[in-house]
Image: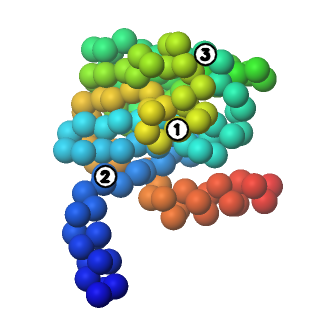
Amino acid sequence: MAKQKKKAKSETSAEPVLRFSEEHLWVRAEDDRAQMGISEMGQRTIGEILAVELPDVGDKLEIGEPFGELETVRTVHELIAPVSGTVVAINSELEDQPELANEDPYYEGWLIEVELAVESELDDLMATEEYEEFVAADDDD
């Protein structure tokens, strides 16, 4: 019986896979769209987020280029695009509740959604296991 439950769970698990950048941003892609935000480790590192500056819908992102900022008590953290694309949605909830990026970075605290320009750029991002190893190595320094 337990085996059947496991099998059923994996069959219904259509949750898109998270990919990560070295700048501690996550990307959740589905078809030609990708939602992104700051990772759990990223938000813990920079501290309490007080304000969020995001691009406008329709703006174009270029991989490796800045697209917004997270303001914390300690610093202003520049957001570097992990993929290229056109912004199709922003999380307007963050204007009044920037702390959502700290409290629930993978769901309620997402930052933007883009229509991907080059889907193959996703291949250059780290899978969850790779990212965990990257973070662990970073902690050792």
Which corner quadrant of the image does residue 139 belong to?
Answer: bottom right
- The numbered mark, 3 or 1, whose residue comes first in the sequence reads 3
Which corner quadrant of the image does residue 88 belong to?
Answer: top left
Residue lying farthest to the front in this orientation = 1
Q: Please state the horizontal and vertical placement of residue 106, each as a whole percent of the image.
A: 47, 42
Which corner quadrant of the image does residue 11 belong to?
Answer: bottom left
Label 3 to label 1, Cα distance in Å?
14 Å
Lateral position of residue 11 relative to residue 130, left or right: left
Residue 123 visible at all: no
- The numbered mark, 1 or 2, whose residue comes first in the sequence reads 2
For disc 3, the marked residue is 51
SS at mark 2?
loop
Badge 1: how crowded within 10 Å, few (<14), some, or many (20+)?
A: many
Q: Quadrant of the N terminus?
A: bottom left
SS at mark 1?
loop
Q: Which mark is residue 105?
A: 1
Label 1 to label 2, Cα distance in Å?
16 Å
Whether the residues at callouts 3 and 2 have beta carbons within 8 Å, the answer is no
- The numbered mark, 3 or 2, whose residue comes first in the sequence reads 2
SS at mark 3?
strand
Q: Amino acid at mark 3?
A: Ala
Q: Please state the horizontal and vertical placement of residue 84, each as a whole percent of the image.
A: 34, 32
Residue 61 visible at all: yes
For the point 78% across and 59% down, the residue is: 140
For disc 2, the marked residue is 16
Q: Quadrant of the C terminus?
A: bottom right
Label 3 to label 2, Cα distance in Å?
28 Å
Q: Please state the horizontal and vertical placement of residue 77, each as a whole percent of the image.
A: 64, 25
Q: Amino acid at mark 1?
A: Pro
Count of number-bearing discs: 3
- Which residue is more in the foreground, 100 or 132? 100
Q: Amino acid at mark 2?
A: Pro
